[in-house]
Amino acid sequence: MPLKKPPIQEARESVHPDQTVSEMVEEVLQRQARALLQRSGCSLQKALEAVLRTNAGQQLSNLRDGPHAQQKVREWQENLLWERALERLGMVSYMEWLEGIEVRTESHALLEEELASLQG
C-alpha cells in the first residue's frame, strides 16, 4: 500500500510562486471542497459553499478578494515574512508609523487651533 503524502506537503506542492494570491486561494478552496465532497457525497457547489461558511473559508475568501489578490504569491509571502519578523522584534511597520504621523499631525493642528481660540 503506497504511503499518502501529508496534507501540508500536498498544499505546498500546489502553490506556485508566480501565481497570484487570488489564484492560490481558489486552488485551496477547491481542494478543500473536493475533500469534503469525497467525505460527504454532496455536490461540489454545496461542498464549496460549506467550506466558505467556515472561519478558515471566510479568511481565505477575504484574502482572495482583498488588497493582495493580484499580488504574486512570492511577493506576498516575502512581505508577510518581513511583517511577522518586525512584529516579533517589537517594531512597528513603516506604513503604520507613517499613518501615525499623519494622525498626530492632524491632532496637533486641531489642538493648536483650539488653544489659539482659547487664548484669543
Image (cartoon, rainbow, N blue to C red):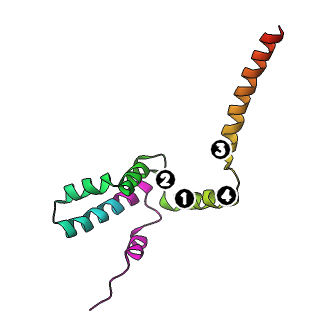
Which residue occupies the foreground of this view, 14 or 6?
A: 6
Q: Which residues are magenta?
A: 1-26
Residue at the spot of label 1: 75
Q: Report crowding for label 3: few under 14, some 14 to 19, many 20 or more residues within 10 A (C-alpha).
A: few
Determine the residue located farthest toward the bottom in the rendered image. 1
Determine the residue located farthest toward the front in the rendered image. 118
- Where residue 29 sits in the image (x, y, percent)? 33, 59
Residue at the spot of label 4: 86
- Image quadrant containing the C terminus: top right
- Where residue 36 sits in the image (x, y, percent)? 25, 65
Q: Report crowding for label 2: few under 14, some 14 to 19, many 20 or more residues within 10 A (C-alpha).
A: some
Residue at the spot of label 3: 96
As measured in the structure, the alpha-carbon distance from the residue carrying label 3 to the one carrying label 4 is 12 Å
The answer to which of marks 4 and 2 sits earlier in the sequence is: 2
Kindly identify the amino acid type of the residue bearing the numbered disc 3: Glu
Kindly identify the amino acid type of the residue bearing the numbered disc 4: Leu
Kindly identify the amino acid type of the residue bearing the numbered disc 1: Glu
